[in-house]
Amino acid sequence: MAGRRSGPCGAFIGLRGSPEMLVVSIPMGRALVLLSNDDGFRAEGLNALRSCLLEIADVVVVAPEHEQSASSHAISLQRPLRFTQHQADLFSVEGTPADCVYTALFGGTRFLPRPPD
């Protein structure tokens, strides 16, 4: 397709134009993207998307420790949320996807250096 980015990442993010145009369109530096899912932090699709987004943005992954399908809107009320840092920008939480996003957004700078874009 003309105007589409070539390679495996183009299919994920559907970017149009050249990478130079993308850099110019983010005036304050690289965007910060928070990624989560319900398949767990080891999920192939999540890690493929992360790799592609790293070309154009800073990415922090905060995803469930284990697969949590069909529980994306559930929250944990009766147990503490524990997290593990696997890399500088890769965390897993012993909880649901909603727990992961809540923890990342309201966990101070433990997870995110600034609010995501």
Image (tube, rainbow, N blue to C red):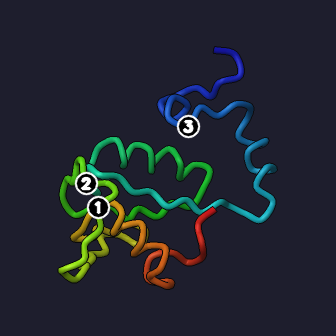
- Pick whichever of labels 2 and 3 is earlier in the sequence: 3
Residue 96's spot in the image, x, y percent?
A: 27, 63
Asked whether disc 2 touches disc 1, contact meaning CB atoms under 8 Å apart, the reply is yes
Secondary structure, mark 1, is: loop
**Extreme residue in the top direction:** 1
Q: Nearer the viewer, mark 1 or mark 3?
A: 1
| Image side of residue 115 versus residue 104, left or right | right
Give coordinates of residue 56: x percent, y percent.
62, 50
Element carrying mark 3:
helix
Q: Helix, strand or loop at disc 2?
A: loop
Going 36% across and 63% down the picture, which residue do you hit? 98
- x 26%, y 49%: residue: 39
x and y percentages locating residue 81 in the rendered image? 25, 79
Q: Residue at x 21, y 54 (%)?
A: 68
- The CA distance from mark 2 to mark 3 is 25 Å
Q: Amino acid at mark 3?
A: Ile
How many angstroms separate mark 2 from mark 1 (CA)?
Answer: 5 Å
- Which numbered dot is residue 71? 2
Above/below status of 117 relative to 48? below
Closer to us: 78 or 51: 78
Identify which amino acid the numbered label 1 is placed on: Ala
Residue carrying label 1: 74
Counting residues from the start of the chain, the first of labels 1 and 3 encountered is: 3
Query: Please, what is the three-letter code of the amino acid marked with disc 2?
Result: Ser
Q: Which mark is drawn over residue 13?
A: 3
How many marks do you count on the picture? 3
Q: Nearer the viewer, mark 2 or mark 3?
A: 2
Residue shown at 47% from the left, 79% from the top? 106
Name the foreground residue: 29 vs 77: 77
